[in-house]
Amino acid sequence: MVADSSGLLILLQLLHSSPSCREGALHVLYALASTPELAWAAAKHGGLVFILEVLLPIQEIPLQQRAAAASLLGKLVGQTMHGPRVAISLARFLPDFLVSVIRDGPGEAVVIALEQTTKLLN
């Protein structure tokens, strides 16, 4: 086992609670994203909410961190064991076409698609 779920949950919580640690936490989570443990923590223990909070910010979050969060989600969706569960969980929060963009595209493309969608809705 690469990491236990409590350690992964702490990393996911850092995305929310510690903006100064956010970039480092994203890097570590991305490195672990191909593990079934992280995909499970994201899908079943609310980890997606913390990642989505970075991708869909209420406050200003740098574009680079938003793109990193989108790339992390894409890697989680592509994880072989629990990736489909992650995609189903994402579909609860996002429209299907955005889940497809997350699955297919680089993080920057996801952020652009989100910004275009937001402009269309306004």
Image: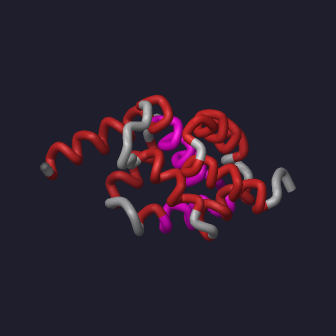
Corner quadrant of residue 116? top left
Q: Nearer the viewer, residue 42 or 78?
A: 42
Corner quadrant of residue 63? top left
Q: Position of residue 15 (x, y in %)?
A: 58, 47
Left or right, 57 with reference to 6: left
Q: What residue is shown at x 50% (from left), y 60% (from top)?
A: 49
85 over 16 or under it: above or below: below
Specify how the rendered protein is coloured: secondary structure
Q: What residue is shown at x 40% (from left), y 51% (from top)?
A: 100
- Magenta stretch, main secondary structure, is helix
User: In this picture, which residue range is highlighted in magenta?
Assistant: 67-89
Q: Position of residue 11 (x, y in %)?
A: 68, 50
94 over 118 or under it: above or below: below
Q: Nearer the viewer, residue 102 or 62?
A: 62
Q: What residue is shown at x 63% (from left), y 37% (from top)?
A: 21
Q: Quadrant of the N terminus?
A: bottom right
Left or right, 43 with reference to 111: right
Left or right, 5 with reference to 25: right
Q: Residue furthest right?
A: 1
Q: Nearer the viewer, residue 67 or 91?
A: 67
Q: Position of residue 76 (x, y in %)?
A: 59, 52
Q: Nearer the viewer, residue 12 or 76?
A: 12
Q: Position of residue 102 (x, y in %)?
A: 44, 47
Indicate yes or no whether the magenta region holds residue 74. Answer: yes
